[in-house]
Image (cartoon, rainbow, N blue to C red):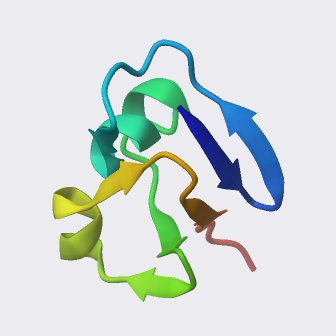
């Protein structure tokens, strides 16, 4: 599966089929685990509950921003 993530095209050969759960992509394939992130899918910002239910397909465009606290 080919996706564009943060402006760079990436291929995920281990993903079989036409789509994958967004939560699986974040946790398993991008190794973000349970880190807090903001996600935009095809120019649409997703709420946290939408990330858990979302699905990505071949050619989708994602922007992923890790949230960090600091002062």
Residue at position x 62%, y 71% in the image? 69
What x and y, as percent, mark residue 62?
Answer: 59, 63
Instruction: Give the answer, above or below, for where 22 lies relative to 49.
Output: above
Instruction: Give the answer, above or below, for where 68 lies relative to 45.
Output: above
Please tell me in which quadrant of the rendered image residue 7 appears. Answer: bottom right
Q: Which is nearer the eye, 37 or 15?
A: 15
Residue at position x 23%, y 73% in the image? 50
Instruction: Give the answer, above or below, for where 68 lies relative to 15.
Output: below
Please tell me in which quadrant of the rendered image residue 9 appears. Answer: top right
What x and y, as percent, mark residue 53?
Answer: 16, 61
Farthest residue toward the right?
8
What x and y, as percent, mark residue 59?
Answer: 57, 52
Image-based side of 17 in relation to 10, left or right: left
Please tell me in which quadrant of the rendered image residue 10 appears. Answer: top right
Quadrant including the C terminus? bottom right
Q: Which is nearer the eye, 69 or 29?
A: 29
Farthest residue toward the bottom?
44
Instruction: Give the answer, above or below, for where 13 lies relative to 35.
Output: above
């Amino acid at each position: 599966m080919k996706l564009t993530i943060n402006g760079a095209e990436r291929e995920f050969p281990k993903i079989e089929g036409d789509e994958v759960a967004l939560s699986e992509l974040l946790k398993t394939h991008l190794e973000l685990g349970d880190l807090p992130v903001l996600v935009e899918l095809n120019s649409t910002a997703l709420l946290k509950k939408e990330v858990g239910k979302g699905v990505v397909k071949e050619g989708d465009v994602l922007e992923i921003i890790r949230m960090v606290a600091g002062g």
